């Protein structure tokens, strides 16, 4: 095992309001020969990680499909256990979550928390006409970027350290939830449980298409509007009925005006209702996805939705929040990002960060002010789209960066 890191030399003076910067030289001093070793070993691991990405993506795991999610959870647990982790399954009706723990060289330090998920947005059968395959230097397939690739990359980073006879600098804990793509309605409690005492939080969601990390995220909420009316024969007794569909349409038109408020975006993602064309609809519902730039916009919009009332006598409107994540705001001082930039520079990489439009489980950490970075998963494009892909040439650099993050001491982050 390499010698334990020695006390770092004084850092360069910080700019006003920011903690001392971490110079690239500190990363190279943490473990002798680290940058060159990690880069070369990561390169040799690329083929294995590429295969692992493909194998994970070939196990279809749509949110809510417990048997398939549990099959993949078992596979992931086995892969991480081989790198030195202990794995615990956390039971959930719609698919088990995983909690994994790796010991560190300094067990007395607060843990580094990594968050991920193994569910996807793709229904079973998607692989029939969209198989996992390699095209033009990319791996393509359902869920390969979001986030089977990220799961494979972290496994590769731990395998790299194990191959070098190394352990992470501090204890590492990972939470892999089965319901992230539907807002983590159950997984949220598990993530929040393990946020307690964490030194920093890393997310394995895909990077920005240009490879930048994610330094902030909008808040998100899924809301279901359910309208009940009164059924009647649409020809003989139409006046006796109250159309739940008509009421829902009017409510959605009114709700759409919420997007005129600063910091709010809305998508009506699913609508259903009624039974037959000759029956006045007695029930209808819509699922709405909302995005928020600020917690104030989120609070204001949800308050408005909670107060919706029916326009038609005999109709009833009910608002139900299905899942919600708070906004994670951008912060001017970001010592964790500076640390990652420093590690990347030592490895011969250029890495930066920028806010992201989507939400994820790192929102829960970032909203609390914990040092948080996301986008440490695969580099590619097209998440949730038919052109979803992972860039093969970026697998090696990402393995090396993740391994460095695990092995090198964190600077002062707060």
Image (spheres, grey):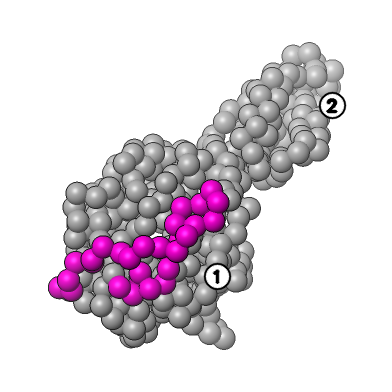
Using residue 38 as the reference point, say whether residue 316 is left or right of it.
Answer: right
Residue at numbered disc 2: 235
* Cβ atoms at labels 1 and 2 below 8 Å apart: no
What is the magenta segment's predominant secondary structure? loop
Residue receiving disc 1? 211
At which x and y percent is residue 193?
A: 34, 38
Crowd tier of the residue under label 1, counting other residues whose Cα lies within 10 Å: few below 14, some 14–19, many 20 or above: many
Q: Quadrant of the N terminus?
A: bottom left
Q: Secondary structure at mark 1?
A: loop
Q: Is 90 or 374 nearer to us in this picture?
A: 374
- The residue sitting at 75% across, 19% down in the picture is 310
Question: Can you see residue 151?
Answer: no
Q: Nearer the viewer, residue 237 or 343?
A: 343
Residue interval drawn in magenta: 1-29
Q: Which residue lies at the image location 55% right of the left edge and 44% below the top edge?
A: 328
Cα distance, mark 1 to mark 2? 59 Å
Q: Is residue 242 above or below residue 126?
A: above
Q: Position of residue 133 (x, y in %)?
A: 49, 79
In the rendered image, residue 288, in percent from the top left (x then y), is placed at 66, 39
Question: Which residue is more in the foreground, 237 or 39?
Answer: 39
Q: Is residue 387 magenta?
A: no
* The quadrant where residue 356 appears: bottom right
Taking depth in this image into account, of 318 and 84 the one nearest to the observer is 84
Q: Earlier in the sequence, mark 1 or mark 2?
A: 1
Secondary structure of the residue carrying tag 2 is loop
């Amino acid at each position: 095992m390499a010698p334990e890191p020695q006390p770092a030399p004084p850092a360069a003076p910080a700019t006003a309001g920011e903690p001392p910067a971490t110079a690239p030289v500190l990363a190279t001093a943490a473990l002798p020969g680290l940058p060159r070793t990690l880069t070369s070993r990561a390169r040799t691991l690329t083929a294995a990680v590429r295969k692992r990405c493909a194998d994970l993506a070939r196990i279809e795991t749509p949110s809510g499909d417990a048997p398939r999610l549990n099959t993949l959870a078992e596979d992931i647990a086995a892969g991480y256990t081989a790198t030195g982790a202990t794995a615990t399954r956390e039971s959930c009706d719609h698919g088990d979550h995983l909690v994994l723990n790796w010991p560190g060289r300094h067990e007395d330090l607060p843990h580094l928390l990594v968050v991920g998920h193994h569910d996807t947005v793709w229904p079973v059968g998607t692989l029939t006409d969209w198989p996992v395959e390699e095209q033009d230097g990319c791996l393509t397939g359902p869920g390969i970027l979001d986030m089977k690739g990220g799961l494979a990359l972290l496994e590769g980073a731990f395998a790299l350290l194990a191959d070098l006879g190394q352990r992470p600098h501090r204890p590492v804990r990972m939470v892999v939830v089965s319901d992230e793509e539907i807002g983590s309605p159950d997984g949220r409690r598990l993530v929040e449980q393990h946020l307690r005492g964490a030194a920093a939080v890393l997310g394995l969601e895909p990077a920005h298409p240009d490879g930048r990390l994610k330094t902030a995220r909008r808040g998100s909420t899924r809301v279901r509007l359910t309208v009940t009316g009164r059924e009647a024969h649409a020809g003989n007794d139409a006046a006796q009925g109250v159309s739940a569909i008509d009421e829902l349409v009017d409510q959605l038109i009114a709700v759409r005006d919420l997007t005129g408020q600063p910091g709010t975006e809305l998508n009506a993602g699913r609508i259903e209702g009624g039974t037959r064309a000759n029956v006045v609809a007695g029930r209808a519902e819509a699922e709405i996805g909302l995005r928020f730039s600020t917690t104030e916009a989120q609070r204001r919009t949800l308050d408005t939705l909670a107060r919706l009332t029916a326009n038609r006598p005999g109709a009833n409107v009910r608002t139900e929040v299905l899942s919600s994540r708070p906004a994670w705001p951008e912060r001017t001082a970001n010592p964790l990002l500076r640390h990652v930039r420093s590690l990347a520079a030592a490895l011969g990489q250029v890495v930066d960060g920028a806010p992201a439009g989507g939400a994820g489980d790192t929102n829960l950490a970032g909203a609390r002010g914990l040092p948080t970075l996301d986008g440490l998963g695969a580099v590619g494009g097209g998440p949730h789209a038919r052109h979803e892909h992972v860039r093969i040439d970026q697998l090696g650099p990402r393995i090396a960066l993740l391994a460095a993050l695990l092995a090198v001491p964190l600077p002062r982050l707060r």
